[in-house]
Image (cartoon, helix red, strand yellow):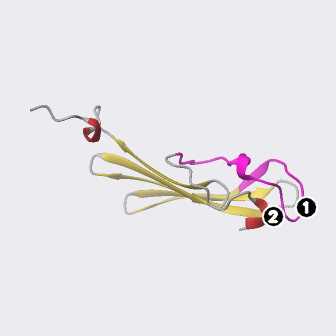
């Protein structure tokens, strides 16, 4: 992974978790070939461990194949919620939790 290729390492992305793609706004250009172009996604894998889906892949420079970052995205279901996380030098860090119920119990008001 290359901190010289990104504007900010592991930027906080709030609840924006990317299962695929690249956060190009954070890409300053390849530190090896000095070009700012699209990226390749390679070594993509999907595995399941203990009910959790884990997607990993590498961001590579399209021109010289320099490894810019390793991306990890996870998805799991815990009780009544879907949980997502992302960790990547380029795309950032984020986590999100969404209710699988029609009405999110966290957003319901008590009436009494």
Q: Is residue 8 visible?
A: yes
Q: Position of residue 82 (x, y in %)?
A: 37, 47
Name the side, left or right, on which 5 lies relative to 69.
right
Q: Is residue 82 within the magenta segment?
A: no
Q: State which quarter of the image contains the N terminus.
A: bottom right
Q: From the viewer's perspective, is 45 left or right of 108? A: right
Provide residue 87's location: percent of width, then percent of height.
56, 59
Quarter of the rendering containing residue 6: bottom right
Image quarter where the C terminus lies is top left
Q: Residue furthest left?
A: 112
Q: Are marks 2 and 1 in contact (CB under 8 Å)?
A: yes
Q: Is residue 2 visible?
A: no
The prevailing secondary structure element of the residues shown in magenta is loop
Q: Residues within 10 Å of mark 2 (few under 14, many from 20)?
A: many
Mark toward the viewer: 2 or 1: 1
Marks 2 and 1, Cα distance to the nearest angstrom?
9 Å
Query: SS for tag 1?
Result: loop
Instruction: Give the residues in magenta.
Output: 16-41
Q: What residue is at 27 percent from the left and 41 percent from the top?
A: 106
Query: The residue tagged with tag 2: helix, strand or loop?
Result: loop
Q: Position of residue 38 (x, y in %)?
A: 80, 47
Mark drawn on residue 66:
2
- Which residue was labeled with disc 1? 33
The answer to which quarter of the image holds residue 11 is bottom right
Tell me the crowding category of disc 1: few under 14, some 14 to 19, or many 20 or more residues within 10 angstroms, Cα based.
few
Left or right of 14, for residue 67: right
Disc with the residue nearer the chain's start (2 vs 1) = 1
């Amino acid at each position: 992974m290359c901190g010289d290729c990104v504007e900010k390492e592991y930027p906080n992305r709030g609840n924006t978790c990317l299962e695929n793609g690249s956060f190009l706004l954070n890409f300053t250009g390849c530190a090896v070939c000095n070009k700012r172009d699209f990226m390749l996604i390679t070594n993509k894998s999907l595995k399941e461990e203990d009910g959790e889906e884990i997607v990993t892949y590498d961001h590579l420079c399209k021109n010289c194949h320099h490894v810019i970052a390793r991306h990890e995205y996870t998805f799991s279901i815990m009780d009544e919620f879907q949980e997502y996380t992302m960790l990547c030098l380029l795309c950032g860090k984020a986590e999100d939790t969404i209710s699988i119920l029609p009405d999110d119990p966290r957003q319901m008001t008590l009436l009494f």
